[in-house]
Image (cartoon, rainbow, N blue to C red):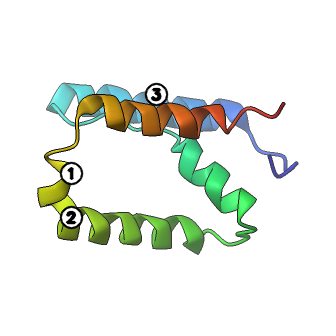
Amino acid sequence: MTQTRFEANPECRGVSIANILCGLVGGAPCTGVLVRTAVNVASGATYKYSQFINSVVCLIIIVVLIKVFVYLPMAVIASILMCSACRLIDI
């Protein structure tokens, strides 16, 4: 998305090892967080701090609004995720 070069093999290896370890200890698997990265790039973010700020904002929203999120049907959450994923496709 940013036309920068990176080594895909070490990154893929690292995520794979992290997912294996998470599975062994019963944790949630790691992801590349593609949607959050796409939003940051589309917003013009140029520093790695943007991912951290986004995570903190998400954490605050979840902590404050967790009582509301409990009542959201899974279909609503799935539709939000599908819309976000479809916007990643460059047509």
Instruction: Name the amino acid type tagged 3.
Output: Ser
Q: Residue, x 24% and y 26% (percent of image)?
A: 23
Contact? badges 1 and 2 (CB < 8 Å):
yes
Q: Does label 2 or label 3 sit earlier along the sequence?
A: 3
Q: CA distance from mark 1 to mark 2?
A: 6 Å
Contact? badges 2 and 3 (CB < 8 Å):
no
Q: Residue, x 26% and y 31% (percent of image)?
A: 74
Quadrant in the rendering for residue 71: top left
Picture coordinates of residue 45 (x, y %)? 70, 69
Residue occupied by mark 2: 65
For label 1, the SS is helix
For label 2, the SS is helix
Query: Mark 1: few, some, or many residues within 10 Å (few <14, many ≥20)?
Result: few
Picture coordinates of residue 67 (x, y %)? 11, 58
Residue occupied by mark 3: 16
Q: Nearer the viewer, residue 56 or 63?
A: 63
For label 3, the SS is helix
Q: CA distance from mark 3 to mark 1?
A: 30 Å
> In the rendered picture of this protein, how many numbered marks are placed on residues?
3
Q: Nearer the viewer, residue 22 or 3?
A: 3
Considering only vertical position in the picture, is 76 above or below 61? above
Picture coordinates of residue 29 (x, y %)? 33, 33
Q: Residue, x 56% and y 40% (percent of image)?
A: 84
Instruction: Name the amino acid type tagged 1.
Output: Phe
Q: Indicate which label's residue lies in the foreground, 3 or 1.
A: 1
Residue occupied by mark 1: 69
Question: Furthest residue to the right?
Answer: 3
Q: Nearer the viewer, residue 31 or 39?
A: 39
Q: Nearer the viewer, residue 26 or 68?
A: 68
Judge left or right: residue 63 versus residue 41: left
Quadrant in the rendering for residue 6: top right
